[in-house]
Image (cartoon, rainbow, N blue to C red):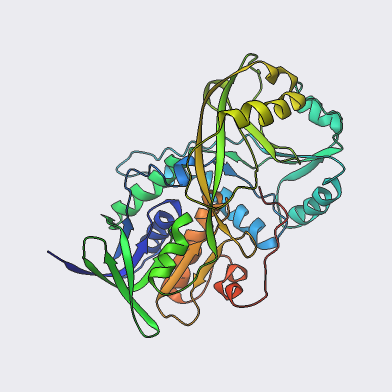
Amino acid sequence: MMGQKAYDILIVGGGVIGSSIAYHLLNDGLDGTVAVLEKDPSYEFASTPRSMGGIRQQFSTEINIRIGLYGIEVIERFDDEMAVDGESAHADYHPRGYLFLADESNWEILQKQCRLQRSLGVDVSLLSPEEIKNMLPHMNVEGLLGASYGRRAGYLDAYGLLRGYQRKAKSLGANYIHAEAVEILRQKDRVHGVRTLKGDMLEGASVVIAAGPWAAEVGAMAGVELPVEPTPQMVFCFDPAEKFEYDLPFTFHPQGQWFRHESGKQVLTGKDRHEDPGFRFDWDRHYFEEDLWPRLARLVPSFERLKLMRGWGGLYAVNKLDHNALLGAYPGLDGLYVAGGFSGHGLMQSPAAGKGMSELIRTGRYETDDLSPLGLDRIFTQRRVLEEAVF
């Protein structure tokens, strides 16, 4: 039997972005009700728990830098502030830093970015090859001209961050509903709810699309086109034969490979590849052995001896326009909001995105940080946010 319920705000997607929005709406004083629709409460294929977990401020645009600065302020106190009934959250932030290595292809770019980052208050410095070697004695610095090192950065437990927001939002009254949206209800230029796969009609004065890689599919339910496509990524975890006494920062090479420590001194790694869009979650052992492993061993020779423990695939929600978030109200359709297209940066940008969307929905304007540069008008104009530091 079809049921009908009414809420003030309906959020389609209960990942870290949707849960951050739900938490902030209620924590910031929304005089109303919030429901979060999540089709997969196990989050088996959600992007959040498959994330690399990185947190940084080393971007090339002011808007992304400011979002990063806000995010680290939240992350550093997250576990305590998200406590429920005396039990802390478990995002387990590890402040190991971010290290962007440079060769001839990107050294000038990193220096320019560093100047902007410092001017906005980012704790970042440029390192010489000798300083890189002092920090990471096992690294081969041949061919490197330097690096950009962000100290107030690192990585966390992505699922722990999601659960922290979710538990706190529920404690404040958010309703999490196990349901799959199949239609966003609208009357002319106004949305007014969601219809689920089971036939339930959920009324809502506002609907927020926070569906990650599925954002375009959900947008189509409202008759709008969102330029977001699912892009597969792969992560590998290996056990190195030689365990380092020091902690690795989150390290990126200009050719695209990256690595960081995981618990037990195991190492997470991956490499940016140009993948065809699609909902694929497989991972390729052959790719690791034939392509990525040799690259890692050239950079860190002791990685020649390792044991591949596991791997997994996940999805970036890539904004095809400019690889930056789409945040705000959808132009010309009252009551519809979008928080998507984060292109791999959703986890680290979830604190600012949740705060900003809460302010916009409740008051009609941004108050903490002006996120309007990431507005949805970009879909209809030639305005782009061109971010160089995309990984």
- Measured from the top left, where is residue 180 in percent x and y? 30, 58
Residue at (76% x, 27% y) in the render: 299
Quadrant in the rendering for residue 334: bottom left
Residue 209 visible, this angle: no
Quadrant position of the N terminus in the picture: bottom left
Left or right of 52 on screen, residue 183: left
Using the image, determine if residue 91 lies above or below residue 3: above
Nearest the viewer among 297 and 206 is 297
Residue 259 against residue 216 in the figure, above or below: above
Is residue 323 something that shows in the picture? yes
Residue 66 screen position, x and y as percent: 64, 58
Q: Is residue 160 left or right of residue 9?
A: right
Asked if residue 33 is positioned above or below residue 87 in the image, the reply reads below
The one of 46 and 248 positioned closer to us in this rendering: 46
In screen coordinates, is 330 left or right of 320?
A: left
Residue 50, percent across and down? 48, 40
Q: Nearer the viewer, residue 172 or 222?
A: 222
Residue that appears at 42% across and 60% down:
21
